[in-house]
Amino acid sequence: MTEPFVTALAADVPVLVITAEAIVIVIPAGQGAVLLDPDILREHVLLRLAEEEVREEIRTVIETDGTLTRLAPEMVGDADIHAACRAVALSTDLGEERGTARFRAALAAIRAAERRLGSSA
């Protein structure tokens, strides 16, 4: 694990922390209410490609298919996995999945509003 890289550090200011495992926005406790502000756009992560999970998948794939490679799972290094994850993340188009998720979220929000308002229009 690498040490985090912090982009800003000031009192009551959101902080972006980047590590090898994740990118995290740390919001000071005093600003928790800002997340509920309807004027502030919020985004939701639908997919996370974790290098440790890829390592587990390598082990599973190699153990399941003995004809795939002569390498042992531990011979695939962290740098190999990191480079492969970056390449896949850069070259994968999830446009169709994003559209489907957006549509499903819209329908779910409509249904939630209908339940909340007690209507089934």
Image (cartoon, rainbow, N blue to C red):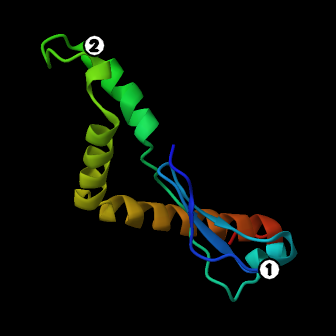
Q: Are marks 1 and 2 in contact (CB under 8 Å)?
A: no
Q: Residues within 10 Å of mark 2 (few under 14, many from 20)?
A: few
Q: Considering the numbered disc 1 on the image, is that residue within a helix, a strand or a loop?
A: loop
Q: Nearer the viewer, residue 2 or 30?
A: 2
Q: Mark 2 belongs to which amino acid?
A: Thr
Q: Is residue 99 left or right of residue 34?
A: left
The residue carrying mark 1 is 11
Pointer 1 local density, CA inside 10 Å: few below 14, some 14–19, many at least 20: few
- In the image, farthest residue toward the right: 30
Q: Position of residue 46 (x, y in %)?
A: 49, 56
Q: Which mark is residue 96?
A: none
Residue in view at x 27 percent, y 28 percent: 76
Regarding residue 121, the answer to whether it shows in the image is: yes
* Residue designated by label 2: 64
Residue type of the residue flagged with mark 1: Ala
Q: Is residue 38 left or right of residue 91?
A: right
Q: Nearer the viewer, mark 1 or mark 2?
A: 1
Residue 55 percent across, percent down from the top left: 38, 30
Drawn side of residue 44 relative to residue 98, left or right: right
Look at the picture and state if 39 lies above or below 11.
below
Kindly identify the residue that appears in the image at 36 percent across and 28 percent down.
57
Of pointers 1 and 2, the one earlier in the residue sequence = 1
Q: Is residue 11 left or right of residue 39?
A: right
**At x 12% / y 13%, what residue is drawn?**
67
